[in-house]
Image: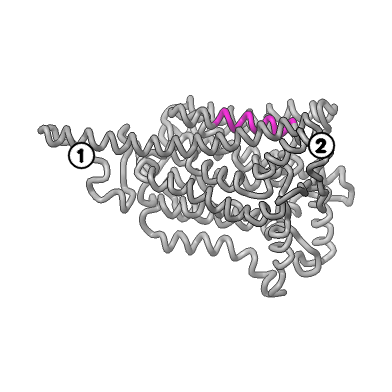
Amino acid sequence: MGRFSGSRGDTLLLAAAAVALQAVVWAILIPVFTAHVGYGLHDLTDVAHYLYYAEQMARGSVPYVDVPFEYPPLALPVFLLAPRDGTLATYEYWFSVEMIMVCAASSVVVTMTARRVWSGLGRPLAAAAVFAVGIAAAGALSLNRFDPVVGLFIALSVLALVSRRFTLAGIAVGLGFAVKLAPVVLLPLVLLLAGKRRVVILAAALIAAVLPFLPFLMLDRGAFTALSGYQTGRGLQIESLAATGYLVRAAVAPGAVRVVVRGGGSLELAAWNTALLARLAPLVMLTLLAVAYLAVWRARRVLRGDPEWVAPAALGIILAFLCGNKVLSPQHLLWTLPLVALCAVARPLAQRILGILMLVAVVLTQVEFPAYYFRLQRLDPVPITIIVIRNVLLAAAFVVTILGLLHAARAELGEEAREQVSAQAGHPERLVGDDGGEDDGQHRRRDGRDAVGAEAP
């Protein structure tokens, strides 16, 4: 579809509603956590680290060269944008304002994506409402990490995909990589759906991803050695799925597992073979990504023909990355919220189940972090139980996503077979893809709306 269906007034109404829902959520959350209901508004925040980096930049220090910096380059503008007067309180206030604005922008993007996928106002409004519920489910976490920015770039890439703007989708993924690396796992999805002009799209994504790194590499070839060393040198993080078995063991056999506090407050496990699992984690993650992309490949005709399946496909890929990673920090679930909102209001039952599973997982994450985090450090059974259940839900969500894509692929094949039988019986119908659309992606949905196909002009 080249344009939004419906009137411009409806589109503006939806955008206003999306922002208003975010305003309502934060008007509730901020007083609750300011009053320390459950935990404080800025408990266990990373904002103090962001202020340190911003102050170093203001003094003329060059990140990666003069000051070790653990994030990719496009995290820097996020830290520098919030006004500061040298006090943490002022910086926390303005950084919170910045993240609220990012959440509001993501809400608008989610709503516009839903507007592209479904006709009418109902599902777009529902998507905005579910996204607001997701933000509430995450609690104050969105104010204390910059990960809502990562979620925004993921949301932008999905909006571009369902709008058939594949070059823009590639650029969004590339910029997301330059913010926090992880969104790059969506690049094969962009290329698969694009059909044509893959070389141009890949080049645009690579330029967007690499360009922010170049100024620092020009100053120092080894500028990013510390960044890569920090990421690869991490051990088995306590909240990761790979650590689940060790947490159960710690609950039933106290003393069998030790907790190591890493710089920045990250908790890692030390026990028999935890170091080996940490080294094997990249292989596990690649295997899960291969499973996810195999399902996406099997369902490629569905994805190209019906944009309703783009969000769950993207969510399945992100879940593969999260479930296979040796590090699964609470803020990483913020990346999924735009996709969860779109899945929760979709028509297929599998997608709605996926949305519910993820929302419950986000709630459990908030319960564990930050309120129970120090008890988790002591391997208390209560936060261990919460994390184990949360991890089981994440694994179940991944399985539901894969099965949903495979079922949609089988249903598509069955429908084509019935159409072929009907045509042979003397009732010819135009078959989806009979013009070579599987290769060039130029399908149309059976309800007459534009499908994900060739890039829109």
Asked which quadrant contains residue 96, the reply is: top right
For the view shown, which residue lies furthest in the right direction? 87
Dot 1 alpha-carbon crowd within 10 angstroms: few under 14, some 14 to 19, many 20 or more: few
Which numbered disc covers residue 430? 1
Helix, strand or loop under label 2: loop
Question: Magenta span covers which residues?
Answer: 355-367
Of pointers 2 and 1, the one earlier in the residue sequence = 2
Asked which quadrant contains residue 211, the reply is: bottom right
Q: Position of residue 130 (x, y in %)?
A: 58, 28
Q: Is residue 60 left or right of residue 206?
A: right
364 falls in the magenta region: yes
Q: Is residue 244 left or right of residue 129?
A: right
Amino acid on which disc 2 is placed = Pro
Task: Between label 2 and label 1, give the one nearer the viewer.
Answer: 2
Between residue 436 and residue 162, name the one nearer to us. Answer: 436
379 falls in the magenta region: no
Q: Position of residue 262 (x, y in %)?
A: 81, 52
Dot 2 alpha-carbon crowd within 10 angstroms: few under 14, some 14 to 19, many 20 or more: few
Q: Position of residue 49 (x, y in %)?
A: 81, 52
Which residue is labeled 2 in the image? 254
